[in-house]
Image: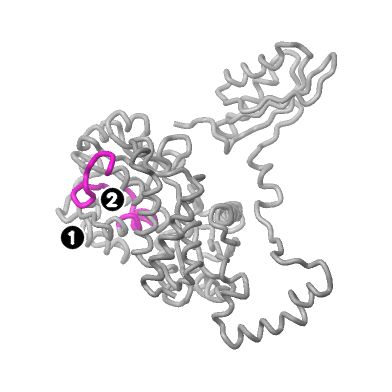
Amino acid sequence: MAVPSPGNSMTFRVHVPADFSAASDLATEVGRAGAVLTGLDVVESSNRVLHIDLTCNTIDDAHAARVTERLKALDGVTVESVTDGTFAMHIGGKIAVAPTVPLDNRDDLARAYTPGVARVCNAIAADPAEARRLTIKGNTVAVVTDGSAVLGLGNIGPAAALPVMEGKAALFKQFGGVDAWPVCLDTQDTEEIIRTVRAIAPSYGGINLEDIAAPRCFEIERRLREDLDIPVFHDDQHGTAVVVLAALTNALRVVDKPLDEVRIVVSGVGAAGSAIIRLLLADGAERITAFGREGVLRSADEQPDPTRAWLAANTNHDQFAGGLSEALAGADVFIGVSAPNILSEADIASMAPDAVVFALANPDPEVDPGAAARHAAVVATGRSDFPNQINNVLVFPGLFRGLLDAGASEITTPMLVAAARAIAERVSPEELSAAYIVPSVFDPMVAPSVASAVESEALSEGNR
């Protein structure tokens, strides 16, 4: 399953005797070591020695170490240094603050700061709604985490979560033109998180909750939505749900099956799984069976929290009591947001003809995508090295762009459905295929399309 990735890109600075075959010999050795060569530059040469930079993708740190040792073992080769491209990109952070107005002379300072700024302060004091127009509030989002559920790394804390939050802020700006800032909180106490976000909210036009563990994340989002007059969005829940609905909409078009008739099995009922189920139900799905760590959810069984109780009451209407593999027999759709390698090829083979499989556990999916593709008509993962990547970047930049442009005070389910439809429609009927059900995150029209759909829905709701 593991393959070389740009996330583990290494550059080896090597010295070799000057020879016409030196560069090709190095490239061959990199390939034999299982790495993918992406660059070879002769940075300096003389009549005796070549200084060469070899850049290649590796699988992980252990693989990079093996490649290093193989290069060192070559006759006449000296490995001077090894540079990790990912760490190099993160040195000094990935975002910065820059002024948007000139500050070149005394007149500029008098308007941007004292004494002129006092007039703007008084205007906002008289009418707080003016803060959206006269400050960064109208285009700024707080990316808030407590570091308790970061990617697939778990509870690594707020400092270790900062690179992810920086990346999120950079994506907000790159794809949606939204200024976002990481807010990594050194607490995992629900009440303290709520108090802190409530206290900083006046500076922001929206709150993006990120990588906060379930079930605490549900309470935090619910309370903040009740307390604040700006949109509060937990991306791990609703961003994932929106892009899954968009992808499933197009996948079902490929196999010509209606959402309200297909039988769907969901593995994982945490933040992502619960939101996916809610949004699918809101858009017309009727036959969903959900599985958590303890097995299938049934309304007949006592549930540990209100979220699972709601899911149990609104899914599995047949009160199915078997295991995940049994539930897949004859199912039309599998959606996994759970754990790696929990399904076999035989499990997928037991599904209905023209089945759809979304195996979204990262970095290792619930089932090998290649094996799944031998039996399912459409296969999607959360990975960039397979077709049909289910990626939240398709959602949150445009979603917040639309919310901020509308001056919305909250996020509603119709907005999420509108966002999903806008994403799905970026794949034209001529482009749609089993290997292309969601647009590229680099499609320049995705974020504007989502923004327009969300803004239109917000304005139609009078959501301000």
Quarter location, residue 218: bottom left
Asked if residue 422 is among those painted magenta in the image, a careful observer would answer: no
Q: Is residue 419 above or below residue 152?
A: below
Q: What's the mark number on residue 291? A: 2
Quarter location, residue 50: top right
Looking at the rendered structure, the kind of residue marked 2 is: Phe
The quarter of the rendered structure image containing the N terminus is: top left
| Mark earlier in primary sequence (2, 1) | 2
Query: In this rendering, would 258 be left or right of 236?
Result: left
| Front residue of this view, candidates 124 and 13 | 124
Looking at the rendered structure, the secondary structure element under dot 2 is strand
Q: Is residue 32 above or below residue 259?
A: above
Residue at which label 1 appears: 300
Whether tag 2 and tag 1 are in contact, CB under 8 A, the answer is no
Q: Residue at x 43, y 41 (%)?
A: 389
Q: Residue at x 22, y 37 (%)?
A: 351
Q: Residue at x 22, y 62 (%)?
A: 313
Q: Position of residue 390 (x, y in %)?
A: 41, 45
| Front residue of this view, candidates 461 and 192 | 461
